[in-house]
Image: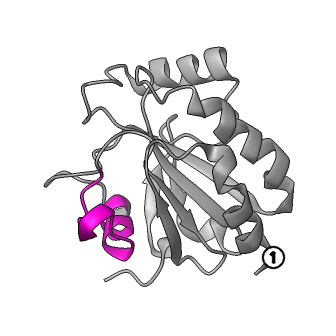
Amino acid sequence: MAASVHDFEVQSISGERLRMSDCKGRVLLIVNTASQCGFTPQFEGLEALWKELGPQGLTVIGFPCNQFGAQDPGSNDEIAGFCQLNFGVSFPMMAKVDVNGDAADPLWRWLKGQKKGLLGTERVKWNFTKFLVGKDGQVIERYAPNDEPAKLRKDIEKALQA
């Protein structure tokens, strides 16, 4: 059983394996994203947080997911191109994953178990669910899809100062 987010490896959108332990000492905002969702414009807010708070120790990490309304049907290359072209995304994007069900990515299974959603459910309800992870690799908070990135700033700044 994993003790922290640092116990996982993930795959980048370009195919490299990345150890989450490389993020030790950084605050993470982990988000399941989609290219064709009503919340897709949140990429702008996520990018703004990354650019403004990244130098202070924040890493935003996007995980494309096609489980909600088939709103991210493209290949990893197509998704990467869309995010860069339309929203200037420069924060790390990972390979497309499932966040729910038997095929759920192990990191996402762990995140959901650490911080349950509304009414105590673990299941991710929709695209742009966000998890704030402290420098120690522990989940601090879980945010709903409609929580705008800018509204998370105070929580992120508090985590950066911890």
How far across and how far down the image is residue 78, in percent?
46, 17
Name the residue: 65% across, 41% down. 46
Q: Dot 1, crowdedness within 10 Å: few (<14), some or many (≥20)? A: few
Q: Quadrant of residue 128?
A: top left
Q: In the image, is residue 72 above or below residue 101?
A: above
What kind of element bears circle 1?
Answer: helix
The amino acid type found where label 1 is placed reads Gln
How far across and how far down the image is residue 8, in percent?
44, 68
Q: In the image, is residue 78 above or below residue 1?
A: above
Q: Find the magenta span and give its range.
A: 108-124
Colour approach in the figure: one colour
Q: In the image, is residue 86 above or below residue 56?
A: above
**Horizontal relation, residue 12 to residue 47: left or right:** left
Does the stretch in magenta take in 117? yes
| Foreground pick, 105 / 12 | 105
Q: Which residue is mark 1?
A: 161
Name the residue: 41% across, 19% down. 36
